[in-house]
Image (spheres, rainbow, N blue to C red):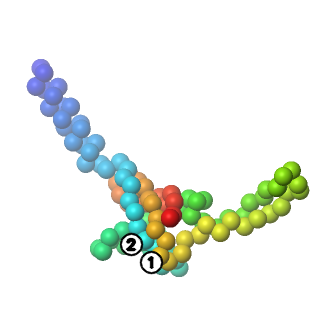
Amino acid sequence: MTDILNNIRRIAVNAVNAQKLADVAHGRVIQTGPLKIQIDQKLILNEEHLILTKAVTDYVTEMSIDGGPKQTYTVYNGLRPGDLVTMIRSHGGQQYIIIDKE
C-alpha cells in the first residue's frame, strides 16, 4: 500500500512540475510598435504574448499636492527600446505579464 501511495505522490509531483505554472523571466525591449521583447538569442516575444501592467504603461491620474486642488497628471512609464523588463510567465508559458522595468 505504501508503494502505491509513493508512486501516486511521485506522479502528481512530476505532473505539477511539468506544467510550469509560473516562472520569472527577464528580457529587453527591442521594438515598441508593435511591441517585441527578446528573452534570449532565440526567443522574441510578440505583442500577442504580452500583458502589460500599469507599471510599464503611460497613464493619466488625478492627484492633489499638500491638500490643494486636484489636478490631472500624465505618468510616463511606457516601454522604450532598450528597457530591461521583468516578466512572469503564466500557466503553460503562452503569456508573459510584464511587471516592471529597470
Residue 75 placement, left or right of 71: left
Which residue does the image show at 65% across and 69% down from the upper left? Answer: 76
Q: Which residue is drawn at 85% across and 57% down?
A: 70
**Extreme top residue here?**
1
Q: In which quarter of the image is residue 39?
A: bottom left
Q: Are marks 2 and 1 in contact (CB under 8 Å)?
A: yes
Q: In which quarter of the view is residue 78 placed? A: bottom right
Instruction: Residue 40: name its quadrant.
Output: bottom left
Residue 30 located left or right of residue 76: left
Amino acid identity at mark 1: Ile
Indicate left or right for 56 with 40 as reference. right
Q: Check the image and name the residue furthest to the right.
A: 69
Q: Position of residue 95 (x, y in %)?
A: 42, 60
Placement of 81 over or under 70, stated as above or below: below
Q: Name the residue under label 2.
A: 38
Rendered location of residue 16, percent (x, y) = 28, 42
Total number of numbered discs in the rendering: 2
Callout 1: few (<14), some (14-19), or many (20+) C-alpha neighbours within 10 Å? some
Callout 2 amino acid:
Gln
Residue carrying label 1: 30
Q: Which of 46 and 59 is in front in this view?
A: 59
In the image, residue 81 above or below residue 58: below
Point 17% across, 25% down: residue: 5
Earlier along the polypeptide chain: callout 2 or callout 1?
A: 1
Q: Toward the viewer: 83 or 62?
A: 83
Q: Can residue 50 be seen in this view?
A: no
Callout 1: SS:
strand
As measured in the structure, the alpha-carbon distance from the residue carrying label 2 to the one carrying label 1 is 7 Å
